[in-house]
Amino acid sequence: MQIIGSFFVLPFALPNAPRFLLHPWVALAAILLGVVNALATLSLYRGFEVGRLSVVSPIASSSPIVSVGLAIAFLGESITEELLLGIILVIMGIILVCIQTAQDDVPGHVLKGAAYAMGFMFLGGLLFFGLKPVSSVLGVFLPVLIMRWTSIPIIAVPFLSQRTRNPETSAFRLIPGVAFFDTFANVAYNVGVSFGTVTIVSTLGGLFSAVTVLFARVILKERLSRHQIVGFVTIVAGVAILGYLSG
């Protein structure tokens, strides 16, 4: 996905390539964000592999908690009572989802997926925060390309260590589409923070869980318990409040 995605964004990033040499410290920050992106990607996809999509996705979508906190601390973005309410709702939603997983028929299996989702929540929050200052200097396309190239060797290590596994060839046909949407979702985010704040854009980006859980229910036939439904709705409501009222 990282390799194919780099080819998608390469033609758009090349015109901004000189900025990489003109701003070496920002370029270094972009490379470090690539490391964060690789670790976040591994954490999220590992969570998808060992856990339930309908549990992993809502928890992972709570990464705005981290990015909002960092934006307030380091970028001078303000927080209101409404924003605080949204953050509390998101945290409550995560707790509700985790309480339900502890009562699941395979608690260790599901909780393991939730743990990886929490890892993505923190790493993703750091990534979404860092893209604001980096993209403001390097443009919206070049940071995405740098992150792709940085992620490739890091992700290759666990990939090559599992070479004996025989993945279904049908899965490979989906990778170009996933690479396209993943790459330009990052570009779209960079465009968003170029015109708006991390608080608004990152929290609205967290709403991806609504689409993910919808597909998990309709296509994968995953069952949602009552507590999961309440937790999911609470997370979505909190993220929506954060995004809508932060302006």
Image (cartoon, helix red, strand yellow):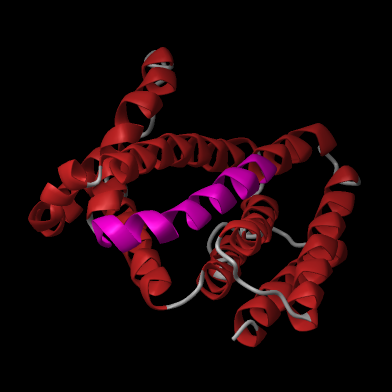
Please provide percent x and percent y for residue 19.
17, 51
User: In this image, 127 relative to 115: left or right?
Assistant: left
73 or 161, nearer to the observer: 73
Q: Which picture quadrant has residue 230?
A: bottom right
Q: Which residue is painted at 38% across and 25% down in the image?
A: 154
Q: Is residue 206 visible?
A: yes
> Please, is residue 238 above or below residue 61 in the view?
below
Q: Does the magenta stretch include residue 21?
A: no
- The magenta-colored residue range is 118-140
> Please, is residue 186 above or below residue 179 in the view?
below
Q: Which residue is painted at 83% across and 50% down in the image?
A: 98
Q: Which residue is painted at 33% across and 59% down in the image?
A: 135
> Please, is residue 157 above or below residue 184 in the view?
above
Q: Which picture quadrant has residue 104?
A: top right
Please provide percent x and percent y for residue 94.
79, 57
Please provide percent x and percent y for residue 35.
42, 34
Please provide percent x and percent y for residue 194.
36, 71
Q: Can residue 181 be seen in this view?
A: no
